[in-house]
Amino acid sequence: MSAAAQRWCRATLAGLALCGALLAAVPAQAHLMAAQKGTLNIVGDAAFLVLSVPVSALQGVDDDGDGALSVAELRAHTDTVRSQVQAGVKLHDSAGALPLQLVMLDVAPPENAPQPAARHLTVMGRFQLRAPAAQPAATVAAVQSLPLSLTFTLFGTAAGERQQDLTITRQSDTQWLRLMPDHPTHALLPSAGAVLAEYVRTGATHVLSGPDHLLFLLVVLAAGWGWKRLLGALTCFTAGHALTLLACMWGGWSAPAALVEPAIAATIVGLAAFDQWTRRCARPLHTGVRLSLVFACALVHGLGLAGALAELTRWAPGSEQLTWALVGFNLGIEAAQVGVAALAGLLVLGLRAAPKGWMQPLEAQRVGTMASAAAMMAGSFWFIERVALSI
């Protein structure tokens, strides 16, 4: 028997042993995997998959329309279910998709249920990793280190079935993923450079797509500061939420969204009100006072950013990947903030250079006052709305 065939046999036996151990470790009809949870363990030159899929994600298999899958329905539609699972769970390497092999399917009905039907299907399978075409004799360690990505599209129709959590392991490396319909593909155990690049994009996208963060930036810009102090304010904002991110991602801190979201809206109202008050003061306050206030607001925003980051991916505390993810996320946020500030500055310069001299210092101050007032109104609306939703 060739070496490749021996490796395949060993991996297959290991997969069967793993599945058997899982089956033996639980009582009959108990859940092998919690709903919408799963694991992908990379062992040798294979990846072993166990996950729980909502039945509502499958088409044409629920004969009685009760939203659950019975043993009889599973037996009648085994091939259909298997093909849909293979199409909805794909592991990719540089050469394309790897086929899902040795798929085993099981329904896990609720305990003491009168009928053996379940709303989730347990799937067990195996992906055979492959060496690149240029290195057909690559070692197992080399094959394991090749970049992989996972695509999952088997999301259910119910509100609570629109996400899938997966734990990825490879020797001592661990990665936690949350796949959602708008983000169904993730890189698995990527390199430090790939993690940094991915989270730079994620951080920038989060700022540019978040109206509350953009509005807070508007309030910061509305102060009419010069570039040096403005960059200082943006840096204070980044440093503040970076500190909270570190505490949440490494220290395990957390706060309920019902408190964080209204608090973020309150920071917008508070900073805008502070700016309105300082404009009416005969003697302007020291720059450090406003920078300290921006930093304090950033601590609150960091709680929201930590929640958004945790929804996408979670790395083991203290891991190298978590470090690079936090660095990239903060760099992306800072880059987006500087970009927004630069565009706003160019707009103001263009208006000041207009032939009629529009947007001169007095008009600029009025525009800043109007911007702060608008931010207070929007922030107040969000605060009331978010408090009402949390009750």
Image: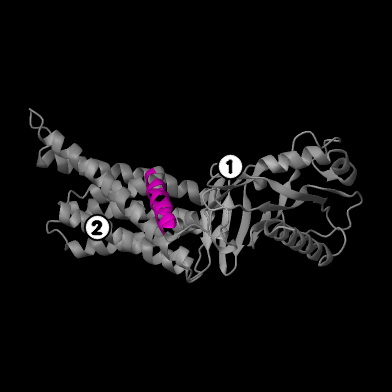
What range of the chain is rendered magenta?
A: 193-208
Q: Is residue 193 above or below residue 388?
A: below
Dominant SS in magenta: helix
Q: CA distance from mark 1 to mark 2?
A: 36 Å
Label 2 Cα crowd, 10 Å radius (few <14 / some 14-19 / many 20+): many
Who comes first in sequence, dot 1 or dot 2? 1
Residue at image position (56%, 61%) is 175
Say which quadrant the N terminus sits in. bottom right
Query: Which circle marks residue 6 in the picture?
Result: none
Residue 154, visible in the rendered structure: no
Residue 194 image-quadrant placement: bottom left
Q: Position of residue 11 (x, y in %)?
A: 71, 60
Colour setup of the view: one colour
Query: Which circle marks residue 181 in the picture?
Result: 1
Viewed as shown, does residue 358 lie left or right of 196? left
Viewed as shown, does residue 296 lie left or right of 122? left
Residue at image position (55%, 44%) is 95
Q: Residue furthest top?
A: 355
Disc count in the image? 2
Task: Specify the amino acid type for callout 2.
Answer: Ala
Specify whether residue 205 is painted magenta.
yes
Relative to the observer, which residue lies in front, 247 or 322? Answer: 322
- Comparing labels 1 and 2, the label whose residue is closer to the camera: 1
Q: Position of residue 300 (x, y in %)?
A: 40, 60
Specify whether residue 273 is painted magenta.
no
Task: Specify the amino acid type for callout 1.
Answer: Pro
Q: What element does badge 2 sit on? A: helix
Residue at image position (18%, 48%) is 224
Q: Position of residue 74 (x, y in %)?
A: 85, 43
Query: Which circle marks residue 233 in the picture?
Result: 2
Residue at image position (7%, 27%) is 355
Viewed as shown, does residue 320 lie left or right of 154? left
